Image (cartoon, rainbow, N blue to C red):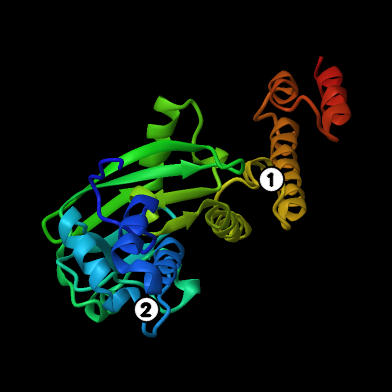
Amino acid sequence: MHERHEPLSAVAPSALADQVAARAGETCGASLHDQLTRGVASPGDCSATESSAARATILHNGVRFGIVDHRQVELDSVRLRLSEARLCRGWPLPLEEDQGVVLHQRDADRAGCIVRPYGGQLELTAVDAQGQRHHAATVDVDKDGVATFEFAEVDASLRRSVGQGLDAYRWLELGETAWAGTVNLERMRGFIADWHFVWVARGRGSAALFAERHAEHPRSGDAEAMALEARLDRQRKDFDAVSAGQMTASAFLERHVWSPFRRAVEDLSVTAE
């Protein structure tokens, strides 16, 4: 089995699931194997959370499980507080499938685990639309189990190692096998674009940059209109400066290659001569 440096998620590697199934025998082997590979508990006589076969496999292999105590995702950064569960009396599994592979304190408590802050590192993996995976960065976790990182740092790391940034990817997995969860990068880009437009609409930032950077955004057309309005306003002010003798006609024509004021400025230039 591949040597792991980080704890497991709710989903068991196939080799460990096979070991549990073999120890459980014919009666519960198939059910336990299914629960472990899906990462979801099925309460009953063959519950992986209460299985002695699962406990024996955990102790034999020194299996640890990753726990997410807190997660905060901002537009520019992520902060996590992480723990790990050891010496579990059964396999900690969530009761609901929509929880995904992430385990929480309640799952560890149900399986009788000893929980302490996670210490070590967290591997970040970027996944594109075709499922291709690239190592994105390694984040240090402090003694309290807290890990923080900024998207700009991860983007720079990817550009150095792969030659393309986070915009080329759909997901960012937090930890080996995403035991600390995932970040939907497409959704994040949508949030960032919405935030960018709000600031542009308030007169802060460049509408032209927004229109170029977020061409598929529903408000891209509005941004283009605002950019045109701002460009015309600058040209109008420069035209007034030429008319008042505060700017030369040649300076205007050099600054504004296209302008509805261009003909009028050229006429002013001829008049001045």
Dividing the picture into quarters, in which one does residue 46 lie? bottom left
As measured in the structure, the alpha-carbon distance from the residue carrying label 2 to the one carrying label 1 is: 57 Å
Measured along the vertical axis of the image, is residue 217 above or below residue 72? above
Quarter of the picture containing the N terminus is top left
Residue at the left extreme, as displayed: 143
Q: Nearer the viewer, residue 170 or 227?
A: 170
Residue at the top extreme, as displayed: 273
Measured along the vertical axis of the image, is residue 78 above or below residue 264? below
Dividing the picture into quarters, in which one does residue 208 lie? top right
Image-based side of 9 in relation to 187, left or right: left
- Image point (21%, 68%), residue name: 55
Image-based side of 65 in relation to 196, left or right: left
Give the amino acid type for the residue marked by disc 2 in the picture: Cys
* Residue for badge 2: 46
- The percent position of residue 20, horizontal first and vertical second, equals 31, 62
- Image point (40%, 42%), residue name: 152
Q: Nearer the viewer, residue 58 or 117?
A: 58
- The percent position of residue 33, horizontal first and vertical second, equals 41, 64
Q: Nearer the viewer, residue 246 or 266?
A: 266
* Residue for badge 1: 211
Give the amino acid type for the residue marked by disc 1 in the picture: Ala
For mark 1, give the secondary structure. Answer: helix
